[in-house]
Image (cartoon, rainbow, N blue to C red):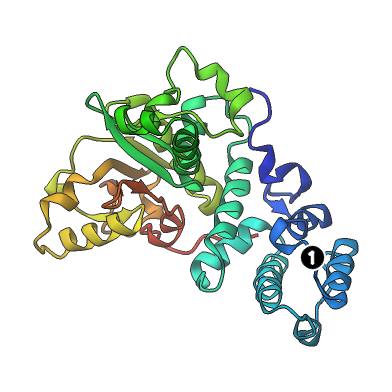
Amino acid sequence: MSDFWVSSGHHLLDRHEDGWLVPTDAFLKAYFARPELMPPEDACDAERSLHAKLLADPKRPVAADEIAALADADARENWDVMLAFRDRLLAHPTLEAAYLDLVRGGMSGTPPLFINQLTQVILRNALEGCSDAFVLRSAELFFRPQRSSVHEGALLLADAEVVELQEESRRNTAPLLVMFSGPAITELDILDAENEASYGHRNEAFDLVLSFGGGLASRAGLARAIEIWVRHLLGVAVSVEPVAKAEETDWAWFVGLDVDSMRVGNQLWRGEATRDADLERIIGLFALRFKDPAEAFPSIGDRPVWLFLSTTPDGMVRMKPQNLVAGLPLRGPAETS
């Protein structure tokens, strides 16, 4: 397959000897060129000067009084957030090490957009050489929210931003079509064996739909992406298999892959009553096993760690891959570069 997820900026980064990503001036300049950081026409001279200096030297320290000198309050806030994120990246030799520190030290103050972008570029590095369209499309769940819909008995997952644009286009061009036609998601192509080769030239569009409920290839693709993610960041080899149900006798550990799944999983773990509606919103159940049981808590052994993936009450899927870093029952913390 041709290069994919070029917009992640992976080509702007250097590689550490262990294969992890080293931040470069070119990568940081791409952040400073973001629209929300570009000085508007009415920007003050101090903002224009700061922006120009950082484009010339993106690793340049910025004093607090330089931010305070900006006339616009929104600009001051944007620069505070961006520079705090930059400094957290530069405090570590690699992006992966910075990500692990964010997960373990707390993501408070870091916008979800930045976390998703960091996730994408790290996952792009981990997936280098992968040519399986189902793995790559399923891996998009790590960093792009999905909209779920049931069509003709099949659970479909589509990129939430793409669906929103599709719905907006329909409202503007054919309002009657919105009233009498099906969900906008049904107008998008569903990834299958016949069109999987097209992922190579349309991967940046994020416009292929996953048949997730009855689509074994899609759930197996997500399982494979999870294996690769865990191995890349934690150095631990695991096998992940999609399953139909969890056996109560094997209830040794669980990780919720989103907020709702964590809440439901904790209720089940504590033996508390769980609403049927919450259980029905679990769309993915996976059994993770450590290939070397010695790397897990002694109580785990070769028993499975159950992974849950759910929709929100309004049908969104917002996966949190950081839960795999923070929540797996590892005997000791993974070493970082």
Direction from residue 103 to residue 295 in the image, left or right: left
Which residue has dot 1 on it? 39
Which residue is the extreme one toward the top?
194
Q: Quadrant of the C terminus?
A: bottom right
Residue drawn 26% across the image and 56% down it:
253
Query: Which is more toward the observer, 43 or 134?
Result: 43
Q: Quadrant of the N terminus?
A: top right
Residue drawn 29% across the image and 46% down it:
302
Secondary structure at numbered mark 1: loop
Residue 181 pos. (x, y %)? 32, 27
- Which quarter of the figure has residue 88? bottom right
Residue 14 pos. (x, y %)? 78, 49
Residue 221 pos. (x, y %)? 42, 31
Tell me which amino acid carries mark 1.
Answer: Pro
Direction from residue 263 to residue 60 in the image, left or right: right
Q: Is residue 298 above or below residue 51?
A: above
Q: Is residue 237 above or below residue 260?
A: above
Q: Is residue 321 above or below residue 228?
A: below
Direction from residue 157 to residue 264 in the image, left or right: left
